[in-house]
Amino acid sequence: MVMWIAVLSLTFLGLALGTLLGVAARYLAVEENPLEAELQALLPGSQCGQCGFVGCAQAAAALARGEAAATLCPPGGRAVAEAIAARLGIKIDLSAVQDDGPLLAFVAEEICTGCCRCSKVCPTDAIIGAAKQIHNVIREACTGCGACVERCPTEAIGLLPVPVTVPHWIWPKPAIT
């Protein structure tokens, strides 16, 4: 009998708190700007901070408010800048935007000391390795943001263009005559 009372009281408590949370979620919901969500979807999502914002969500919010330029995302390059400008309906000058193509970090193993500074600043945890051990980069996780390059004290990390392989091959654009 005591067990049934405990089960029923916990069931009633769970239902009451669940209902309370549901009502609170409905009445206390914060309206979001749909433009921010669209702009965030256009950004690469690497959360690298190269644009001066903590993450892509804050960058999208600044773009939606008109407080940031459409060319703010270095990893995105020209393609992302053009997509953002088209979505916002503005014209931009792409002459200052560098578009080196997709880059990947690499570690020169002969000079890596295993200080772990690079792995602490990597926004996607693409660098693996332990203290005083040689580090390596997981290519599928690397976004090429370059945060690790600036942090490495021995200059063992660099950025290289993504090698042309079957999964990364892109059909070249035709020559304009």
Image (spheres, helix red, strand yellow):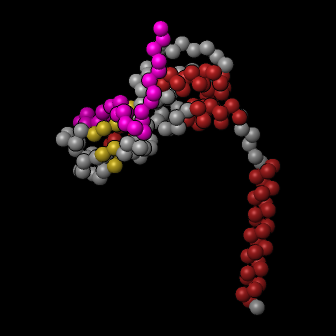
Q: Is residue 130 above or below residue 16?
A: above
Which of the 4 image quadrants contains residue 8? bottom right
* Residue at 77% over, 84% down: 5
Query: For the magenta stretch, what is the residue range?
Result: 149-177
Could you say where residue 130 lies in the image, as x and y percent from the top left? 29, 52
Residues 56 and 82: in front is 82
Residues 29 and 41: in front is 41
* Residue at 42% over, 39% down: 167
Q: Farthest residue toward the bottom?
A: 1
Q: Is residue 118 left or right of residue 169?
A: left
Q: Farthest residue toward the left?
A: 110
Q: Is residue 173 left or right of residue 12?
A: left
Q: Quadrant of the N terminus?
A: bottom right
Q: Farthest residue toward the top?
A: 177
Could you say where residue 15 lies in the image, as x and y percent from the top left? 78, 68
Could you say where residue 78 lies in the image, as x and y percent from the top left? 50, 22
Residues 120 and 80: in front is 80
* Prevailing secondary structure of the magenta residues: loop
Q: Is residue 105 magenta?
A: no
* Tag count: 0
The answer to whether one can see residue 72 in this image is: no
Could you say where residue 86 lies in the image, as x and y percent from the top left? 63, 21
* Residue at 28% over, 46% down: 135
* Residue at 51% over, 15% down: 94
The answer to whether one can see residue 109 in this image is: yes
